[in-house]
């Protein structure tokens, strides 16, 4: 009886440990994916801004529509995956006439 109880408790503890490990692993995986999405959105945002600035300084306007599209795409991804403080700062920047 004692050996059977020990085996059952070991099995239950093993299952609980496996479930707990799986949950933590999934949470870490989601956090890593979100961090990668954020970094991609931030870098695409900065890249689109630098393209627009260089195009405007050189007087090149033929690619402006596609560059504005890339900028808006990056902004929308920032709004989806960034922290609230970042989104509020971005909103404040654009509302104050940020170019």
Image (cartoon, helix red, strand yellow):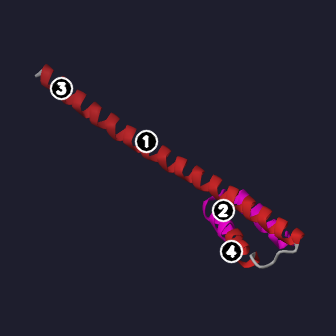
If you read the primary sequence from the N terminus, does the residue marked by circle 1 or circle 3 appear first? 3
Image coordinates of residue 11 in percent, x first then y, are 22, 31
What element does badge 3 sit on? helix
To which residue does mark 4 refer? Answer: 69
Please tell me which residue is depicted at 84% across the width and 65% down the height of the picture. 54
If you read the primary sequence from the N terminus, does the residue marked by circle 2 or circle 3 appear first? 3
Please tell me which residue is depicted at 73% across the width and 74% down the height of the picture. 68
The question of residue 94 being in magenta is answered with yes
* Distance between mark 1 and mark 3 Cα atoms: 27 Å
Q: Which-is-in-front pick, marks 4 and 3?
A: 4
Quadrant of the image containing the C terminus: bottom right
Q: Which-is-in-front pick, marks 1 and 2?
A: 2
To which residue does mark 2 refer? Answer: 78
Relative to 73, say whether 19 is above or below: above
* Distance between mark 4 and mark 3 Cα atoms: 62 Å
Comparing 77 with 43, the one in front is 43
The question of residue 22 being in magenta is answered with no
To which residue does mark 1 refer? Answer: 25
What element does badge 2 sit on? helix
If you read the primary sequence from the N terminus, does the residue marked by circle 1 or circle 2 appear first? 1
If you read the primary sequence from the N terminus, does the residue marked by circle 4 or circle 2 appear first? 4
Residue segment shown in magenta: 73-99
Quadrant of the image containing the N terminus: top left
């Amino acid at each position: 009886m004692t050996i059977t109880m020990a085996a059952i408790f070991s099995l239950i503890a093993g299952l609980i440990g496996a479930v707990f490990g799986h949950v933590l692993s999934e949470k870490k995986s989601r956090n890593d994916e979100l961090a990668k999405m954020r970094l991609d959105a931030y870098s695409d945002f900065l890249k689109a801004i630098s393209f627009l600035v260089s195009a405007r300084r050189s007087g090149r306007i033929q690619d402006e529509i596609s560059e504005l599209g890339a900028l808006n795409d990056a902004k929308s991804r920032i709004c989806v995956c960034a922290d609230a403080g970042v989104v509020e700062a971005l909103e404040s920047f654009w509302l104050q006439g940020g170019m």
